Amino acid sequence: MCTSLTRQTLDHHFLAGRTMDFPIKGNWHPVLVAAKTYNTPLAGNRPIKYPFIGGGQLIDNRYLLVADGVNNQGLSCAELMFPLKASYHPTPVDHKLNLTPQDFLSWVLAEHRSVADVLTDLNQVAIIGHEWLSGHEVYAFHWLLTDSSGQTVIIEPLNQQLVVITDNIGVLTNSPVYVDHIQNLKHQLHVTTDKFSEWQRASKQLVVNHAVPRPTNTPTTRFVYTAVNKLGTTPSDNPKTAVNFLNQLLSDVAISFEPAMNQHPNFNFTHYISSWDCTALTYQFTDCENKKAMTFSLTDALNNSSQSTHFLV
């Protein structure tokens, strides 16, 4: 149960953020990915052309799984769960770069400078329903990408194809598919038009009247809450106010851990909240257990350790 959104500032910074919601207790940390290569189970070692910073954890004390990040070219990606909807190829496809779902984010960030670059290469990729380097589960993901130009796309694996949604509002949660989220949003806004200005007008009215529908733990209500608050407010003045906006909104939809969840291993809770600036190349990571927010500069991290993949704390 994750939520992600983008945010633009009046001084032309482009940011994004997300909640990392997952049912299994994990040891998530901010991480610098700057080694020469990353490993995949089907395509072997792949080059890291563009190092990146993000949130990740070690699986089996060996394999690094990254859930979001921004690279040194200002390209960012967040992976979110997409249960019951994700459709992958059952076996590797000839003449394609075959990746598992967990590999896709690293392929995006390590090998591309921009969203446009990703879209140019996307038809070369096939996502295979194959276990990753560790474990036996095939995760259902879809992805939100944005870059320093502000271009934003959503990529959803449907009918064994990677469907690109370029006309989007820069908000993503979990299933259903994005177009169904938009239909539900229009219903909540009492609009039938596809005019973006009308969505903004209706959202602003709800924000001004303090009548935004409150989110529950369902992806649909969190999508509506996030979308209305984003559409109904003006762009932030600067990166600091944008980060504050992202953190507050994401905190509103975060799911607190409860001890009773130990008896229900499929219950989701929020492990961390992250936000990043694709223009300034900064990354903020807030651990939801200790509430500590840590901000890192990718440029500084690379100056300190330019060819190493490691946790930053």
Image: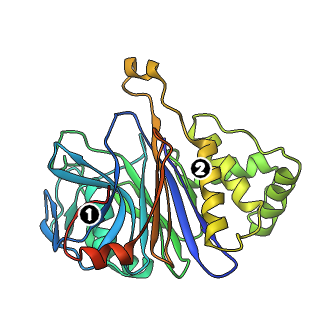
* Residue 38 locus on image (x, y percent): 18, 66
Q: Which residue is mark 1?
A: 126
Q: Would you identify the image quadrant in which residue 230 lies? A: bottom right
Residue sitting farthest toward the left? 44
Neighbour tally class for label 2: few under 14, some 14-19, many 20 plus, Cα within 10 Å: many
Neighbour tally class for label 1: few under 14, some 14-19, many 20 plus, Cα within 10 Å: many
In the depicted view, which residue is nearer to us: 246 or 30?
Answer: 30
Q: Secondary structure at mark 2?
A: helix
Q: Would you identify the image quadrant in which residue 121 lies? A: bottom left
Asked if 132 appears above or below 301 in the picture, the reply is above
In the depicted view, which residue is nearer to us: 267 or 273?
Answer: 273
Q: Which mark is residue 160?
A: none
Q: Secondary structure at mark 1?
A: strand
Quadrant where the C terminus is found in the figure: bottom left
Asked if 176 appears above or below 68 in the picture, the reply is above
- Work out whether residue 169 can be spotted: no
- Residue type at mark 1: give it: Ala
Q: Is residue 45 left or right of residue 215?
A: left
Residue in the picture at 37% in, 78% down: 299
Color scheme of the displayed model: rainbow
- Residue type at mark 2: give it: Leu
CA–CA distance between discs 1 and 2? 32 Å
Q: Which mark is residue 250?
A: 2
